[in-house]
Image (cartoon, rainbow, N blue to C red):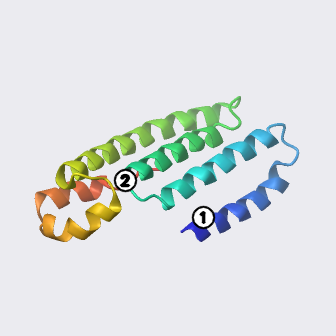
Amino acid sequence: MLLTVSGVSFLIHVYSVGYMYEDEGFRRYFVELNLFVFFMLILVSASSFLLMFVGGEGIGLCSYLLIAFWYRQKAPADAVKKAFIVNRMGDYGFLLGMILIFVTFGSLDFLNILPVAQETLTYGGIAVTMITPFSFPGSD
């Protein structure tokens, strides 16, 4: 995933140089884009659900900044409000999932959870049924 994120972001950067070249916010755009890539790399290299949450929140922040890049126009300003509401719902769900994981396993670290997950969770049980849908980071 690190190679995929890096490769795709490289292509986006190359395309963006030509597309954004004459825009007055050229530098601001690339700061926001690079920050987005940074948080995406944190997300895909995370070793715990907590670090995934940090990466997802960073991606959400950068999404807002990029969606509202032309903030003087009405459509981007309205779109960022909608994105904020949808992302908050996803974040609350992921927080609930992290709480359920911590209550069930006593840890949020993948290396502590994965070896004991099969013995702790029963197929079709309430814990796995509640944890699974809430274990997706945000809705970014």
In the displayed image of the protein, which residue is found farthest to the right?
22
Taking the spot 44% from the left edge, 36% from the top edge, the residue there is 85
Q: Is residue 99 left or right of residue 53?
A: left
Q: Secondary structure at mark 1?
A: helix
At horizontal 69% and vertical 31% (from top left) the residue drawn is: 73
**Which disc is residue 92 wearing?**
none
Asked whether residue 20 appears in the rendered view, the answer is: yes
Q: Earlier in the sequence, mark 2 or mark 1?
A: 1
Q: Is residue 37 above or below residue 119?
A: above
Residue type at mark 2: give it: Phe
Most extreme residue toward the front, as rendered?
A: 112
Task: Name the residue located 61 percent from the left edge and 52 percent from the top edge.
Answer: 38
Q: Position of residue 75 (x, y in %)?
A: 63, 36
Q: Position of residue 109 (x, y in %)?
A: 33, 57
Residue kind at label 1, given as amino acid type: Val
Residue 121 in sight in this render: no
Q: Which residue is mark 2?
A: 49
Using the image, tell me which numbered label, if any, was put on residue 5. Answer: 1
How packed mark 2 is, by other alpha carbons closer than 10 Å (few <14, some 14-19, many 20 or more), is many
Horizontal side, residue 124 vs residue 18: left or right: left
- Secondary structure type for disc 2: helix
